[in-house]
Amino acid sequence: MPILPIVTYNDPILLKKAEEIEEDSPELQTLIDNMLETMYNADGVGLAAPQIGRSIKLFVMDTDAMIEEGEVPYGPMVFINPLILEKRGNKIPLEEGCLSIPEVNDKVFRPETVIIEFFDREFNKHRLEAGGWTSRVIQHEYDHLEGVLFLDYLSAFKKRLHKKELEEIDSGDKKVKYPIVPKQKD
């Protein structure tokens, strides 16, 4: 399975809402396998289709390496056409990063719990209530399908603190262990 290049934070595809997936296909199943392989290769815990240049409502995740005692291990999961039904609980600040914004991390406040409906890779419908890291990753990846990045939650001051790192990504000078597609020069 090929490792797919990940687009960086300033690619226009990451700023628009993704489109629904109408039907299953061998191409979709191959894409899911490739996304999982790409996520693991980059040491990520989640990857949304827009991050690999596809504006469709699909993300994959595997939070088992992050879960804390008492949290449920789910293994690799596939979310097709997900819809967050409810977010609840206190907004907790936790450090987030993103494969499309390599080596940039900052605290983001998100609700503790999320309830989401989605189709798995066999197009079986599920409803999941999740907390902890699983909730965090679901909300982060879902944001990608809505054209939102974790940088959008940061204050102007916090964004300025990351300016140098973002410029390195823009210039293509940022060295990461997985393939990325930096901003195209005009």
Image: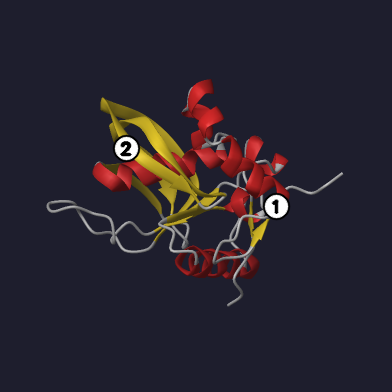
Q: CA distance from mark 2 to mark 1?
A: 27 Å
Label 1 neighbour load within 10 Å: few <14, some 14-19, many 20+ = many
Compared to 137, does 174 lie above or below?
Answer: below
Front position in the image: 61 or 8:
8
Picture residue at 31% right of the left edge, 32% below the top: 93
The amino acid on which the numbered mark 1 sits, given as a three-letter code, is Pro
The residue that disc 1 covers is 182
Quarter of the picture containing the C terminus is top right
Q: Secondary structure at mark 2?
A: strand
Residue 33, x across and y down, in percent: 52, 70
Badge 2 vs badge 1, beta-carbon distance below 8 Å:
no
Q: Residue most toward the right?
A: 186
Instruction: Kindly state the secondary structure of the residue where label 1 is placed.
Output: loop
Estimate how packed mark 2 is, as few (under 14), some (14 to 19) or many (20 or more) residues with alpha carbons within 10 Å: some
Q: Which residue is mark 2?
A: 94
Front-lying residue, 139 or 121: 139
Q: Position of residue 132 (x, y in %)?
A: 25, 43
Figure disc tally: 2
Task: Check the image and report above or below for 133 versus 34.
Answer: above
Q: Which amino acid type corresponds to the residue marked 2 in the rendered image?
A: Leu
Residue 38 at x, y = what percent? 53, 66
Q: Which mark is residue 144?
A: none
The colour scheme used to paint the residues is secondary structure
What's the residue at 41%, 35% (across, down)? 84
